[in-house]
Image (cartoon, grey):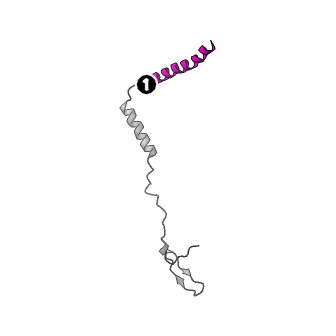
Amino acid sequence: MEAMAWWLIPIVATLLAVVWVSWRARPRRPVDPHQSLAAHRRFTEALSPPTPSPEVRSPEVRSPEVRSPEVSKATGQGTQVTPQNRRSV
């Protein structure tokens, strides 16, 4: 009798699996194309980056050649800072 009780577990599990698969495979109701297109439009608007307004300006970036001249401690004369003569700190 105990062996029959152990067979009950896989039989019930199999029946539950069959019921679940048949429920998941049932035919779906038709989707309204207008609802589908509206949902897709909302989705793409949510993922698209915001467009900057015309009033917003990006900060000006100064190039290394436009920086103010450094004054040499030894000679007291200024030198233009360029990428070629810039020292890494």
Amino acid marked by disc 1: Ala
What main secondary structure does the magenta stretch of the protein show?
helix
**Which residue corresponds to the image point at 40% horizontal and 40% vertical from the top-left?**
41
Residue 16: within the magenta? yes
Where is residue 8? Give x, y as percent: 57, 16
- Residue lying at the far left of the rendered structure: 33
Where is residue 39? Give x, y as percent: 42, 36
Q: Which image quadrant: the N terminus?
A: top right
Is 86 rendered above or below residue 9? below
Is 59 rendered above or below residue 45? below
Q: Which residue is mark 1?
A: 25
Q: Which image quadrant: the C terminus?
A: bottom right
**Which residue corresponds to the image point at 39% horizontal and 34% vertical from the top-left?**
36
Where is residue 62? Give x, y as percent: 49, 70
Q: Of 45 and 79, which appears nearest the observer?
A: 79
Q: Of 25 and 16, which appears nearest the observer?
A: 16
**Which residue corresponds to the image point at 38% horizontal and 36% vertical from the top-left?**
37
Q: Of 88 and 14, which appears nearest the observer?
A: 14
- Residue lying at the far bottom of the rendered structure: 75
- Tell me the quarter of the picture where residue 11 sits: top right
**Which residue corresponds to the image point at 55% horizontal and 86% vertical from the top-left?**
77
Horizontal arrangement in the rendering, residue 77 relative to residue 24 (left or right): right
Horizontal arrangement in the rendering, residue 24 relative to residue 13 (left or right): left
- Residue lying at the far right of the rendered structure: 2
Q: How many badges with numbers are in the image?
A: 1
Where is residue 25? Give x, y as percent: 43, 24
Q: Of 66 and 87, which appears nearest the observer?
A: 87
For the record, the magenta segment spans 1-28
Is 14 rendered above or below residue 33? above
Residue 20: within the magenta? yes
